[in-house]
Amino acid sequence: MSSRTVIRGGLVITASDEMHADVLIEDGRIAALAASGTPAAEGWTAERTIDATGKYVIPGGVDVHTHMELPFGGTFASDTFETGTRAAAWGGTTTIVDFAVQSVGHTLREGLDAWHAKAEGNCAIDYGFHMIVSDVNEETLKEMDLLVEEGVTSFKQFMAYPGVFYSDDGQILRAMQRSADNGGLIMMHAENGIAIDVLVEQALARGETDPRYHGEVRRALLEAEATHRAIKLAQVAGAPLYVVHVSAAEAVAELARARDDGLNVFGETCPQYLFLSTDNLAEPDFEGAKYVCSTPLRPKEHQAQLWKGLRTNDLQVVSTDHCPFCFVGQKELGRGDFSKIPNGLPGVENRMDLLHQAVVDGHISRRRWIEIACATPARMFGMYPKKGTLAPGADADVVIYDPHAEQVMSAETHHMNVDYSAYEGRRTTGRVETVLSRGEPVITEREYTGRAGHGVYTPRSTCQYLS
């Protein structure tokens, strides 16, 4: 039995086009698009018709940086794959790529298997995995080749967090050399963790224990230095590089320079760096702990360079780095010592709306919104055109978006499993109305109609920006 859905009367927006068109969905995929009101479109029949008049019809968001159930600092991220993917759907995101973690002394395979076990049967939307490489050795390097073959084509390394995820320059170089051969993409957390640890120790010794000092010790210059070093190591290895959660103007400048030199270097930023700042970290009564993440929030003046980077394509992707910890009982672990505050912010539900607000505010165009939130992440991590666009043959991951609806972001109304919102009280224009994942309604006119287990694991091909 085939099932057909027609979406009529909306403005279809992709990274490359905008047109008033009807969309025909058949058996979970986009079957055809035709200009609204034309005989071709008028002739379609379907079991389900969705009226999108006055609304946008956009591809489901692709969030390639989430951390569901991540162990960190003696606790776990508060969203499970079930709650986190449901919240993602509420926010118009239909695919996530989460991070499986290799623990030191264990194999990549053990880490990947553990994350498959967490996610399988629990996700409301489709998902894939990157692999965090914490222990580079001969066996790990061989495993990287096997993982690329089976669709885990990206590997994250850390220049930060000595003693946990940290890799030294030699380990980084070896992994980069391997990815140059096997087609994988190295994702880098670029901060000089060795130097930061010295500054943390010195700050605590001076009695500087409040959350705002988290931002002060993790200096923009140490992000820029590590970004520069990662670029040079990738250049030596002949490997591409993707720098995650870029927050500092100086780091954007390093990426821009590398790209001007013709290197395969890519950059991602996150909504928190575009909309929040050190003013939030400095909120009194330990409230600033809610905003502790790494890389840290920067002074407001950095935001202009991030927006510029998104417009000039020196930054290509906006992901969330969604890694929620409740204020009560989790963030509070760092009272009296900012270095013990679990690092991470909730945001998987807010990204598409915040970026639409950026369209309203004139920072980016509508098509660039779709490009940085849907199409480019899908291309960067080998899922396009199955994900990230609306075209015949693509998965029918479709969002009906009301560009005029107004909302106030709040922990009272969000669906993430966390007791605060990083954007509490923020008024935004634009809201998700209906979400289809592979043609199945997950959100129907602002009601959750999805289910855990609908989402399936999605193996990926290699980065589509590399010749």
Image: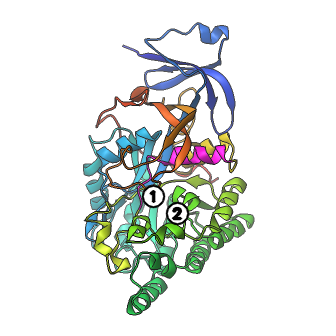
How many residues crowd around disc 1 within 10 Å: few (fewer than 14), some, or many (20 or more)? many
Q: Could you tell me if the residues under marks 2 and 1 are in contact, i.e. CB atoms within 8 Å?
A: yes
Q: Which residues are magenta?
A: 345-361
Tag 1's secondary structure?
Answer: loop
Residue 167, image quadrant:
bottom left
Three-letter amino acid code at the position of disc 1: Asp
Tell me: residue 61, above or below residue 390. below
Q: Position of residue 71 (x, y in %)?
A: 29, 64
Q: What is the quadrant of the N terminus in the image? A: top left
Q: Position of residue 239 (x, y in %)?
A: 58, 65
Tell me: residue 208, above or below residue 245. below
Tell whether 52 sits left or right of 322. Answer: right
Q: Nearer the viewer, residue 159 or 354?
A: 354
Residue at horizontal 30%, vertical 54%? 115
Tell whether 397 sits left or right of 332. Answer: right
Residue 450, image quadrant:
top left
Residue at horizontal 53%, vertical 69%? 279
Residue situated furthest front in the rendering: 285
Q: Which residue is mark 2?
A: 245
Q: Which residue is mark 1?
A: 321
Q: Is residue 255 magenta?
A: no
Q: Is residue 364 in view?
A: yes
Tag 2's secondary structure?
Answer: loop
Tell whether 403 sits left or right of 38. Answer: left
Q: Nearer the viewer, residue 58 or 393?
A: 58
Tell me: residue 21, above or below residue 60. above
Tell me: residue 380, above or below residue 8. below
- How far apart are labels 2 and 1 at the CA level? 7 Å
